[in-house]
Amino acid sequence: MNLLLISIVVFGLLILGLSLLFPSQVRISRAIDIDVTKEKILNGVGNLQQWQYWNDMTAKEELTNKRFSDSLFSSDQMRVKLISASPEAIITNWNRNQNESI
């Protein structure tokens, strides 16, 4: 009986020790080099009217009643609002079906 209890405790500690080796969060990112100025990229990315030419999410055929402005893209299925744009970061708010945040 003691051997079984000791085995369970050792096995539990082994599993705990192995789990501590894995990170609690994983971040996946991709990067590419683009040979243009930050201002030119900001004009394309920071202006939602330009997204229809390069963003696959806004170019989908199944989106109906698409409307683009400088700071808002909307359709019957989703909405993207530009919160802020600077050469360092573009912050947007995405909603699906007008309520559910993405």
Image (spheres, rainbow, N blue to C red):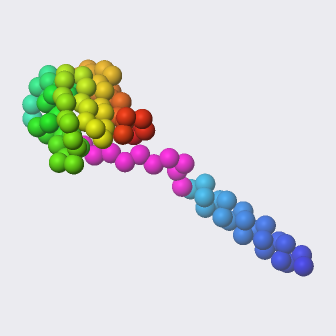
With respect to residue 28, does 19 lie above or below?
below
Task: Name the residue located 33 percent from the left edge and 45 percent from the top edge.
Answer: 29
In the foreground, 73 or 48: 73
- Does residue 23 sit above or below 71 in this rendering? below
Q: Residue at x 68, y 65 (%)?
A: 14
- Quadrant of the rendering where the N terminus is positioned: bottom right
Q: Quadrant of residue 34?
A: top left
Q: Is residue 45 visible?
A: no
The magenta-colored residue range is: 22-32
Query: Could you tell me what secondary structure mostly forms the magenta stretch?
Result: loop
x, y percent for residue 70: 19, 22
Residue 61 is situated, as x and y percent measured from the top left of the image, at 17, 48
Location of residue 67 in the rendering, given as x and y in whole percent from the top left corner: 19, 30
| Quadrant of the image occupied by residue 63 | top left
* Front one among 5 and 62: 62
Q: Is residue 63 magenta?
A: no
Does residue 97 appear left or right of residue 15 in this picture?
left
Task: Please report the residue visible at 56 percent of the width from the left and 56 percent of the height from the top.
Answer: 21
In this rendering, is residue 17 above or below 53?
A: below
Report if residue 28 lies within the magenta region. Answer: yes
Q: Is residue 67 above or below residue 20?
A: above
In the picture, measured across the screen, residue 43 lies left or right of residue 80, that is left
Residue situated in front as seen by the camera: 81 or 44: 81
